[in-house]
Image (cartoon, helix red, strand yellow):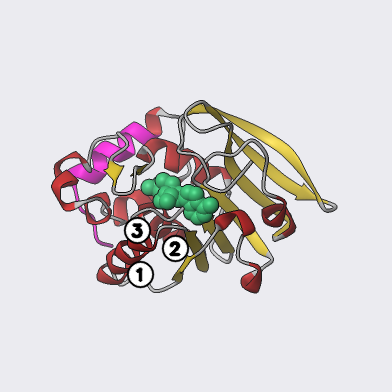
Amino acid sequence: MEDYGTGANRLIAATRAQGVNDERVLEAIRRVPREAFVPIHATDEASSDVPIPLPQQQTTTQPSLVARMVAALGLEGGEEVLEVGTGYGWQTALLATLARMVYSIEREPDLARVARQNLARRHIRNTSVIVGDGYRGVAEHAPYDAIIVSAAARTVPSPLADQLRDGGRLVMPMGPGGDDEVVAYERRDGQLVETADLGPARFVPLIGSD
Ligand code: SAH
């Protein structure tokens, strides 16, 4: 399998240091070069465990935090996943190596366009990037086995809870944006039950929420 070397090793070390031991997730980080999913002027920073600014006042999430959130989904390979907030698509690419199909919704058409290009260049085909309001989810392909949200809101948007399969997991930063708590939920008998608190983090707000 392709290995892009030192950059990946730095991110893997940072991710392990954050307590992620899921070998499938670490292997996904090894395979998907982050430098291919950041703005061209930021490729030097891509191997550092730091957020990187994107156009439209958005920002890529710190890799070790992406890894912790993705690990909390417990993906085994056969799942259909909904991602809300594509950005430039690095997390989308990780999810695509860990699950069967990833639907990703992004509200900024310019970001979605770049994400599609980045994914296509890496020959990642089991993703579909949709432009729209992630607050509503993507009903056409529901229910999902897992949902991951990359922007914060004070409550889980009810369409997302509705589009999660019973037994499925949802991970999302809860808060106003900038001062949030990442929470993992499981849907049981139609209700979202909190299963883990992944700790504090700073996310951009999910636009259109509250
Ligand atoms: N997952 C990416 C991007 C994180 S930034 C990464 O880890 O790098 C959060 C993204 O959510 C931005 O691209 C922003 O445009 C998008 N976003 C914010 N509100 C949204 C909404 N209501 N629907 C869809 N996308 C949204």
Q: Residue at x 69, y 66 (%)?
A: 143
Residue 43 placement (x, y as % from top left):
17, 47
The answer to whether the residue labelled 1 contacts the one labelled 3, judged by CB atoms less than 8 Å apart, is no
Where does the magenta region start and end? 1-15
Predominant secondary structure, magenta span? helix
Q: CA distance from mark 1 to mark 3?
A: 17 Å
Report the front residue among 39 and 48.
39
Task: Report the disc number at residue 96.
Answer: 2
Q: CA distance from mark 3 to mark 2?
A: 18 Å
Residue 176 placement (x, y as % from top left):
56, 32
Q: Residue at x 56, y 48 (%)?
A: 208
Residue 91, placed above or below residue 204: below
Label 2 vs 1, first from the N-terminus: 2
Label 3 vs 2, first from the N-terminus: 2
Q: CA distance from mark 2 to mark 1?
A: 7 Å
Report the front residue among 102 and 149.
149
Q: Is mark 3 within 8 Å of ligand 1?
A: yes
Report the front residue among 32 and 144.
144
Q: Which residue is mark 1?
A: 124
Q: Quadrant of residue 89?
A: bottom left
From the viewer's perspective, is 13 left or right of 191? left
Q: Is mark 2 within 8 Å of ligand 1?
A: no
The answer to whether the residue labelled 2 contacts the one labelled 1, judged by CB atoms less than 8 Å apart, is yes
Q: Which residue is mark 3?
A: 111
Q: Is residue 9 magenta?
A: yes
**For the residue carrying disc 3, how many other residues have a C-alpha within 10 Å: few (<14), some (14-19), or many (20+)?**
many
The amino acid type, in three-letter code, at marker 2 is Ala
Q: Residue at x 50, y 43 (%)?
A: 151
Residue 68 placement (x, y as % from top left):
48, 38
In what quadrant of the picture does the N terminus appear? bottom left
